[in-house]
């Protein structure tokens, strides 16, 4: 298997731990863990902003049923939901009125933390978790919104001996001691369940067709698809969602070839560095995704 070789090389070279899964969307089996190729695919992982995918699914279902109209408008002042984040509404300085649909768009395309927390406040976290259980994704759990993750990290840093101020220089180096990076106590999933959720969206299984169409549209507009895309050429389109925290680097998405092959891929990395910008880790995600898809394409050729 190409994936095994690539994982061994990258983990030795970069000091990362890789959690990977990929599945052929045209040869999907019922078992979340029992189909496709992967490594540590059933182990819990820190979702980081990939947790916004379950939020999107619940939002699109609500819009498709009419319980929350997509054009329902929300007015926000700079003091509403003052969550951290360097994109979207999180950096706006003036009041704004935006539709629920476009909040979801900003949540996914630029990973807007403020938009995410507004959407979650409207949906309710328990409803999102209940939807995941309904879809059979029992290891995909949201403990809180973006502000919750930051507040939890700040509280845990302050409780260290000696305490670390959240905004202190180098504070991110201590994040590994926080609940936010504990896959048993933070927003979490598994690689296999992440690709299962993507498979449900692309194959319209267990989710209304209109909701799937809208979710796929939004996922296709992500402005940072480079982590997966680097592993492929111009013959593919990539729809997905990144996730980044200190020591965490993720991307999950669907890779579609012009000839029709479709593969859901989820790569979650635990890295030895807390830096948010590290192109070599992005390259590792690309290499792992490409290897997993290459293995699946080899299987497909054998079965044709």
Image (cartoon, rainbow, N blue to C red):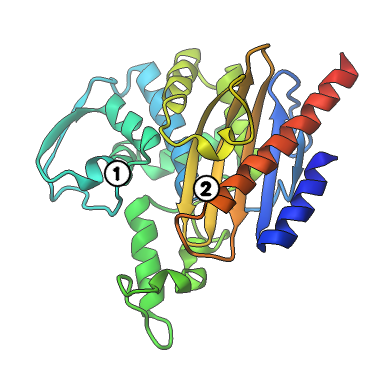
Quadrant of residue 33 within the rendered picture: top right
Say above or below: 86 vs 255. below
- Sequence-first disc among 1 and 2: 1
Image location (x, y in percent) of residue 197: 58, 32
Say above or below: 170 vs 219. below
SS under mark 2: loop
Is 44 on the left or on the right of 82, as rendered? right
Name the residue carrying label 1: 87
Name the image quarter holding the C terminus: top right
Q: Residue at x 11, y 43 (%)?
A: 77
Q: Residue at x 85, y 26 (%)?
A: 299
SS under mark 1: loop
Is 34 on the left or on the right of 254, as rendered? right
Crowd rating for badge 1 (residues with CA inside 10 Å; few <14, some 14–19, many 20+): some
Q: Which mark is residue 113?
A: none
Q: Which mark is residue 141?
A: 2
Q: Nearer the viewer, residue 264 or 159?
A: 264
Image location (x, y in percent) of residue 293: 72, 31
Is 101 on the left or on the right of 65, as rendered? left
For the question of whether residue 143 can be seen, the reply is yes
Name the image quarter holding the N terminus: top right
Q: Nearer the viewer, residue 226 or 222?
A: 226
Is 62 on the left or on the right of 268, as rendered? left
């Amino acid at each position: 298997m190409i994936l095994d070789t690539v994982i061994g090389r990258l983990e030795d070279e970069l000091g990362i731990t890789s959690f990977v899964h990929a599945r052929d969307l045209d040869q999907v089996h019922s078992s979340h863990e029992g189909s496709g190729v992967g490594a540590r695919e059933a182990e819990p992982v820190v979702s980081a902003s990939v947790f916004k995918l379950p939020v999107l699914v619940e939002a699109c279902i609500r819009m498709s049923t009419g319980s929350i109209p997509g054009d329902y408008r929300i007015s926000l002042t700079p003091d509403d939901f003052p969550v951290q984040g360097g994109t979207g509404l999180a950096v706006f300085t003036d009041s704004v009125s935006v539709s629920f649909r476009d909040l979801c768009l900003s949540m996914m395309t630029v990973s807007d933390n403020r938009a995410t927390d507004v959407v979650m406040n409207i949906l309710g976290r328990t409803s999102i978790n209940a939807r995941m259980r309904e879809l059979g994704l029992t290891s995909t759990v949201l403990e809180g919104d973006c502000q919750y993750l930051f507040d939890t990290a700040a509280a845990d840093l302050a409780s260290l001996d000696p305490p670390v101020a959240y905004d202190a220089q180098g504070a991110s180096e201590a994040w590994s001691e926080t609940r936010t990076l504990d896959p048993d106590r933070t927003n979490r999933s598994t690689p296999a369940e992440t690709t299962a959720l993507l498979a449900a969206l692309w194959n319209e299984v267990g989710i209304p067709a209109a909701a799937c169409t809208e979710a796929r549209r939004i996922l296709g507009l992500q402005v940072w698809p480079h982590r997966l895309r680097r592993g492929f050429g111009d013959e593919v389109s990539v729809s997905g969602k990144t996730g980044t925290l200190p020591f965490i680097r993720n991307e999950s998405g669907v890779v579609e070839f012009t000839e029709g092959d479709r593969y859901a891929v989820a790569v979650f990395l635990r890295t030895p560095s807390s830096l948010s910008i590290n192109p070599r880790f992005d390259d590792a995600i690309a290499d792992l995704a490409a290897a997993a898809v290459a293995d699946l394409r080899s299987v497909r050729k054998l079965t044709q």
